[in-house]
Structures are given as structure tokens and as C-alpha cells.
Image (tube, helix red, strand yellow):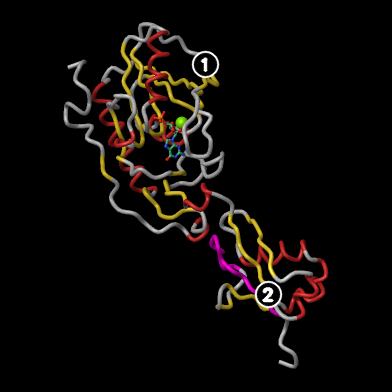
């Protein structure tokens, strides 16, 4: 029974993502869609824990979780495991350049002794497989008796190293996801859901063209300027930025008319890459 993996036994069949949801308003500028909400995550984590408990009924298990992406997953998972276990962490960083994987480096060593032990190695995402293959190799070098793998998400079609996990939460599409511990440039780890990051965020900053009309053109000293903003920036943030760049416009601060393309928009309107924003002077005698 020991040699039967959870997948072979038919209990560990990974779930497909049920359906995409809309991002909460506060994150709509950053997150294209919600892959997994809190309820879906919690239900699946409880199922994974039940499988693990069945496979290690006596416990006596050492869980090694890879930092930092697994913080939320491991915290939820172990709270569903009413068996004796020890928990430790290893730091592995792939020094990603943007969203492309780079060279692997161990940034934190294990504190617990794993020699002769059953180890459950936990990671957030199984992608090309390089991280888990390297981490497992390290545990075997340290004398672990048997190492099983558990991942929250599996991007199956991206595999470069032949490697499968024994416990898989969900099958993930080939998109860059954040939240529930997963980051993009150290942001978004704290989101309680898993979302697909807007490509405009990992491709570049948000570039907007600003057009000055009528006498604003004279005050600004130009008719057009390109402005780079943080992704998800609003029209109000653009206005503040432009006033910082062109102090002569400040006396008219309250009377700008601002249009995105041909539509007037409120301050909270979220700008999109390539938007053209027009600054008009106030209408005389209006
Ligand atoms: P692998 O070595 O399997 O290619 O990569 C696994 C690691 O890449 C994961 O531990 C995770 O940190 C990172 N990774 C892969 N895909 C994604 C993704 O969509 N979002 C985030 N935030 N990290 C990812
Ligand atoms: Mg990681």
C-alpha cells in the first residue's frame, strides 16, 4: 500500500478549476479574473488533508514546505491534519525575471533532521517541475526515507522535467496567477483568492497619452505627453501626476475637464494601457 500514490489509488485526482469569476472591485485593475475563491480553496484543501491523513494514519510525518509561496496553503492544510507531524520550511528561489523562471537558489536550509523519515514536500505550484525536482533531490541527499509531493496548483502542460505530485489541489491553466501566497514581484501574496494577473501588469507599466487642448497647451508648453503610471492607476491619480509635472496648470486644478478617448469619466475610472486622456480648460461662462 505504501507504494501506491494518491493518484494511482484514484483519490488524489486533481480538480479542474470550476469556472472563472469576476475580480473584486478593489483588484479589478490588477486581476483579470478569479481562478479560485475562498470557498473553493477551503473545500479542496480539506479534501487533500483527508487523503494525506488516510495515507499516513499514524502520522510520524515530516512536512517540508517551500517558502514563501506556500504560506497560506500550508497554514490551511496542517490545520486539517489531526495526526502527529513535524513542520519545517525550505527556502528555494528561482530568481525569476518577471514571470520567466531563472536559476534555482536555496535561501533557507531545513532545521529538522529528515534522515530515515517520511517526508511530505509541499509547494504552491508545480510548473516546469525544476523546483520540486531539485528540492526532492536535496531531501534525498539529507537521508529522507520516502518523499511524497503535494502541490496546491499543477500546470501540467508546462512540465520540462518528468515529475508528478501525489497530491494536487487544482489543475491550473497556463497563465500567471497570484494570491493565496503567490506573488508577482512580492505583491499580491495576501489576496484571499487566486487570480489571473492582468498581462498589462507583468508586461509593462501603464502608459497613457495625455493631450492638452486650447490654452492648456500654452500653459503646459506642449500638446501631448506620455505618462507611465502604476498598473491599475485611476484618472484621479493621473490628474495628480500631471499637476506635479506641469505646475502652471495647478491654479486651474478644480476646473479641468478630463476625457478618456471621447468619454468624460469620474476620478475613480481605471485607466488602461494606451488610453488617450484629454485635458480641456473650463467652459467660459458655463
Ligand atoms: P517550476 O520550478 O516548477 O517551474 O516552478 C515552480 C515555481 O514557480 C513555483 O514554486 C512558483 O513559485 C513559481 N510559479 C510558477 N507559476 C507561477 C504563477 O503562475 N504564479 C506565481 N506567482 N508563481 C509561479
Ligand atoms: Mg515558489
Residue 210 image position (x, y, % from top left): 65, 68
Vertical comparison of 125 with 39: above or below: above
Number of numbered discs overlaid on the protein picture: 2
Residue at (52%, 41%) from the top-left corner?
184
Nearest the viewer among 48 and 148 is 148
Residue 54 in the image: above or below residue 275: above
Badge 2 marks a residue whose secondary structure is strand
Q: Quadrant of the C terminus?
A: bottom right
**Residue annotated with mark 2:** 279
Q: Which residues are magenta?
A: 268-280
What residue sits right under mark 1 in the picture? Answer: 109
Q: Residue at x 58, y 74 (%)?
A: 265
Question: Is label 1 in a helix, a strand or a loop?
Answer: loop
Question: Is 163 colored magenta in this rendering?
Answer: no
Question: Which quadrant of the figure contains the N terminus?
Answer: top left
Within 10 Å of disc 2 (Cα), the crowding (few <14, some 14-19, many 20+) is many
Q: Which mark is on residue 159? A: none
Q: Quarter containing ligand 1?
A: top left
Residue, x 35% and y 48% (percent of image)? 39
Q: Along the horizontal axis of the image, is 115 left or right of 16? A: right
Magenta stretch, overall SS: loop
Q: In this view, which residue lies farthest toward the bottom?
A: 285
> Closer to the N terminus: mark 1 or mark 2?
1
Is 72 above or below relative to 283? Answer: above
Front-lying residue, 84 or 249: 249
Position of residue 34 measured from the top left corner of the image (x, y, whole percent): 40, 52
Mark 1 → mark 2, Cα distance in angstroms = 56 Å
Residue 270 magenta-drawn?
Answer: yes
Residue 221 image point, x, y percent: 79, 69
Q: Position of residue 204 (x, y in %)?
A: 56, 50
Amino acid at each position: 500500500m505504501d507504494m501506491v500514490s494518491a493518484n494511482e489509488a484514484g483519490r488524489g485526482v486533481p480538480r479542474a478549476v470550476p469556472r472563472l469569476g469576476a475580480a473584486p472591485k478593489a483588484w479589478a485593475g490588477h486581476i483579470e479574473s478569479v481562478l479560485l475563491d475562498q470557498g473553493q480553496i477551503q473545500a479542496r484543501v480539506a479534501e487533500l488533508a483527508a487523503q494525506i491523513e488516510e495515507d499516513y494514519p499514524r502520522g510520524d510525518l515530516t512536512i517540508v514546505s517551500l517558502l514563501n509561496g506556500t504560506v497560506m496553503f500550508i497554514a490551511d492544510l496542517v490545520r486539517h491534519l489531526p495526526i502527529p507531524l513535524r513542520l519545517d520550511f525550505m527556502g528555494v528561489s528561482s530568481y525569476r525575471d518577471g514571470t520567466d523562471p531563472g536559476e534555482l537558489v536555496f535561501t533557507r536550509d531545513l532545521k529538522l533532521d529528515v534522515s530515515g523519515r517520511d517526508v511530505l514536500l509541499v509547494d504552491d505550484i508545480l510548473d516546469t517541475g525544476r523546483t520540486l525536482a531539485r528540492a526532492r533531490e536535496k531531501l534525498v541527499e539529507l537521508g529522507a526515507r520516502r518523499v511524497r509531493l503535494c502541490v496546491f496548483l499543477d500546470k501540467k502542460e508546462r512540465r520540462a522535467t518528468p515529475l508528478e505530485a501525489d497530491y494536487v489541489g487544482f489543475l491550473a491553466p497556463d497563465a500567471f496567477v497570484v494570491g493565496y501566497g503567490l506573488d508577482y514581484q512580492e505583491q499580491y501574496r495576501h489576496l484571499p483568492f487566486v487570480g489571473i494577473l492582468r498581462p498589462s501588469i507583468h508586461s509593462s507599466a501603464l502608459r497613457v497619452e495625455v493631450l492638452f487642448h486650447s490654452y492648456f497647451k500654452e500653459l503646459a508648453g506642449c500638446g501631448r505627453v506620455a505618462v507611465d503610471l502604476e498598473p491599475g492607476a485611476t484618472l484621479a491619480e493621473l490628474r495628480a501626476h500631471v499637476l506635479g509635472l506641469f505646475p502652471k496648470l495647478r491654479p486651474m486644478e478644480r476646473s479641468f475637464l478630463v476625457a478618456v478617448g471621447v468619454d468624460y469619466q469620474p476620478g475613480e475610472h481605471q485607466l488602461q494601457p494606451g488610453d488617450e486622456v484629454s485635458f480641456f480648460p473650463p467652459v467660459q461662462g458655463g
